Amino acid sequence: MKPAAVLSLLKRGSLSTASLRAVLIVLMLMMAALGARIQPITQLDQDFVADRFSWAPRKASGKFVFLAIDKLTLDKVGVWPWPRSIYAEALEKLSAADVGDIFIDVDFSTPSTPSEDERFADALDAAGGGVLLPIFRQAASAGSRQASLSKPIPELLAKAWPVFADVPVDRDGVVRRFYLGGDADGSPVPSAGAALSGVSTSYGSQLIDFSITPASVPTYPLIDLLSGKIGKGELAGRSIVLGASAVELKDIFSVPTHPALAGPLIHILTAETQLQDRELWEIDQTLLNLGLAAALVIAMLRFRAFGLMPTSLSMLCIGAGVEAIAFFLQSRHGILLGTAVPWSLLALAWVIALNERINIGETLAALANRNARNSRRMIKSIIADSSDGIVTFDADQKVSEISAKAASLLGIGIGDPMAAMSEPVLAQAVRQLLAKGGGKREDKNSITLEFASGEGAFFEAVLTIAYPEGEGHGQEPAFGGSIVIRDITERKLYEQKLKHLAETDALTGLLNRRTFLDRIGEHHRSLVLLDIERFSNICSTLGREAGDGLLKAVANRLRDTMPDRLIARIDGDLFALLVADEGKPSAEQADDLLQLFKDPLSIKGALTTISVRIGLADCNIVDAESTLRAAESALDVAKSSPVAWAAYDPQMSLRQARARRLELDLRNALRQDELFLLFQPQIDLASGTFLGAEALLRWKHPELGLVSPAEFIPIAETSGQIVDIGRWVVMRACMEAASWPSGTVSVNVSALQFAQPDLEGDILQALSASGLPASRLCVELTESAFIDDNASSIGKMQALRSAGISLALDDFGTGYSSMSYLADLPLDKLKIDQAFIRRLNRDRHVRQIVKAIISLGHDLALGIIAEGIEHEDEMETLRQFGCEAGQGYLFGKPQSAADLIHRDRPARASA
Ligand code: C2E
Ligand code: MG
Ligand code: MG
């Protein structure tokens, strides 16, 4: 069983006493059999062995003396490496002191000066050739595995005995054993220790007894020998080891009992180990350990009834006993016993004893449960205090925890079924989430949804169903679920506000253009555009604020009367609305809207009447943008229509295209001589004499042929080109008329042309250029010329009249014609519009009107001229009513000036 598995069993409280017992027994047996191979156990054993060495120290025999090349000696001699004569001198002194074996533990593998080497060789010779010099095994080169031998130079070696002086270092860097000897160049050579102690075996290794204290080895600084300070008796008969102890010389090793010991002392301890017969033994304890393990298991199970305390004490005693035996065997018999494994076995046995008495599995489980209970309590309080609404539920879909907020919002409490929630959308989402898993376990299923509740409150709910890890294989999956509900009302309201701002026109609160077009749907039949007439005039006279007020008032009226319709402000003073199919014809729709603005609007308390123009288009035109464009075309038409509205028809765009073309081409018409004048005679109705002629403009378009002034004059008026054209007409008409023997030329002057400040100058210039007397020029004006700016118009008219030019009011009886202003205007003639003449003899009322106009004109001292006389009876009636002049096809169509001069005037007059 893996440790992780045991842990997880413990967590769930399902590890019984018996199973834990089994686990522990297996562990004990494994420890007994393999423990000695586990590194930390071996280390412990070695530490115990070292401790035992120091608990039973031994004295050195005193047979070996260490002459140390120590710091003092190095300082006294003053150089390193030493001249070999110093060793020679030492040798001589030692020989004189009658010492036993001498081992000089110094590396002589490289030559010194020949005289020094010779001096030392001589000393070795003199010493009787029995001095031991060291040889070392060392790596042949850095990193190489092959060993090479480092030996004293031959001159020296020839006079001495070689001994191995290398020390084997264990893997942990500690020296514990020594070599007995080895092979050098094919012949057996003993180690220094072996040679000094006189052992004959030259192979293998043995453990050093570190209970022999290095401090008990007689040690002298070498300088004492050289300076003759050591008495003869102190050295006689003893073996000498001469070597380095100064740290600088780096012949230092770590041993079990000391962190640092000089190499020569290790050789001495080696020799002492041999001499004192302290051969140390390590034994294989596996069987012993297994026996101990078995005995302990049996004892633990047999003596279950024992209290834990006596059992623990017994175990401590056993441990102490084992330790005592180990100490005895090591100090007395050199047998090294590892006690780390027995201690581990005792510890495991103690756990078994504990398990037998308190069931560790259950205890740990209880602990784990307590933790779980604590966490649950914590979660409970987190849920209860949460500012979000939180509900958790179990696999039975019953509420397991619920926060106060969620309880009040959903109307459920702990133990209630989730289906009882007062928000059906949430209950539905729970079902959906469970169905989504389809019984298939997924780690986590989650849904986020938003819902509105109560009065204008919005919530976001995150539903999660989680399946606990690693359970429920093959069975109905167990799960837990939660719903976290957050109040997002503020965010929602903010979003709605942003949306509203993005969709509406800030000034009027109506939809804006983009949103309006987006919302055009299939059920909408027509798009209606509504434009306020003369809005820019209102703005420039009353100010921008008043303009804004007017737009708001219009928006309000539209919204108030049609609350269900989509209404937008498209741009400036342009409003749009969508009409669903109500079966009403366009005319009625338009009329309804026009009626809507019959009543004045209230702008800042002041009542203002406005008129509107309306363009309609069917919604089935390709797309929303095209529909809008179509309605705009219709509106353009409506602007010049007497009924103030127009519905789009495809012809309309053709006409508009033609109008745009004419406007472009008209720019070149004057320059390219495409314009010319025709003249229509005006006749004295009583006598039939020629009174003059009206100049009528014509345009011969190079491609479209003759274009009627009724078509191009309005275009020239809206584009402003009428000013230049009109100036040309006046000039041309005066030039022509100047060549006539008599008669007046009448020239039409547009409102825009009349409004020009230099109009008077232009006319006077035409007169003087042509030489035509002012009395032979008549200017025809329509009402529109003075409707906008009465005062300045009257001024201009007076100026023209005082120059001798006569003024006629053209098309009288149409438009706004009001009798009241006739009295104020400085006029000479009235031209009765041809529409009246057409119905003169068919309509009694018209007859009365014409009669009245003539009589009124005469009362105001105005001349009367009727235009559009086509038939004799019309002429007759007019003559009877006292109308003095006439113009019409009956007397002559508009014709060239040349034709006019040669016309047969008397013939017409007599007709
Ligand atoms: P208007 O000034 O009322 O001109 C009279 C129009 O009635 C002319 O149409 C003329 O040809 C037409 N007419 C005359 N007698 C008869 C008749 O017996 N029966 C019928 N059916 N029609 C008759 P025209 O030439 O097509 O001109 C149309 C309008 O264009 C003019 O109406 C005038 O307002 C404008 N116009 C013509 N020339 C000029 C011009 O040089 N300058 C300006 N500003 N407007 C001009
Ligand atoms: Mg006219
Ligand atoms: Mg006219």
Image (cartoon, grey):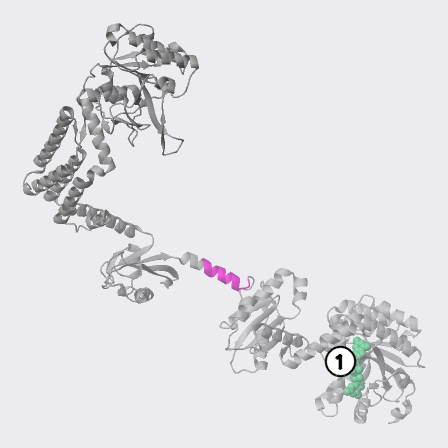
Amino acid of disc 1: Ala
State the image quarter where residue 399 is shown.
bottom left
Residue under the point 39% across and 57% down: 488
Q: Position of residue 330 (x, y in %)?
A: 16, 26
**Occupied quadrant, residue 889:** bottom right
Instruction: Name which residue lies at 27% across and 7% down.
Output: 97
Q: How many marks?
A: 1
> In the image shown, does 152 or 177 lie closer to the viewer?
152
User: In the rendered image of this protein, does residue 100 appear above or below residue 251?
Assistant: above
Residue drawn at point x = 51 percent, y = 61 percent = 501
Pointer 1 local density, CA inside 10 Å: few below 14, some 14–19, many at least 20: few
Which residue corresponds to mark 1? 710
Residue at (65%, 71%) from the top-left corner?
A: 533
Q: Position of residue 242 (x, y in %)?
A: 31, 15
- Residue 860 appears in the picture as rendered: no
Left or right: where does residue 542 sit relative to residue 492? right
Mark 1 C-beta closer than 8 Å to ligand 1:
yes
Say left or right for 224 vs 786. Answer: left
Question: Does residue 394 appear in this view?
Answer: yes
Q: Please state which of residues 241 and 27 is positioned toward the viewer in this rendering.
A: 241
- Give the magenta-colored segment's residue range: 494-505
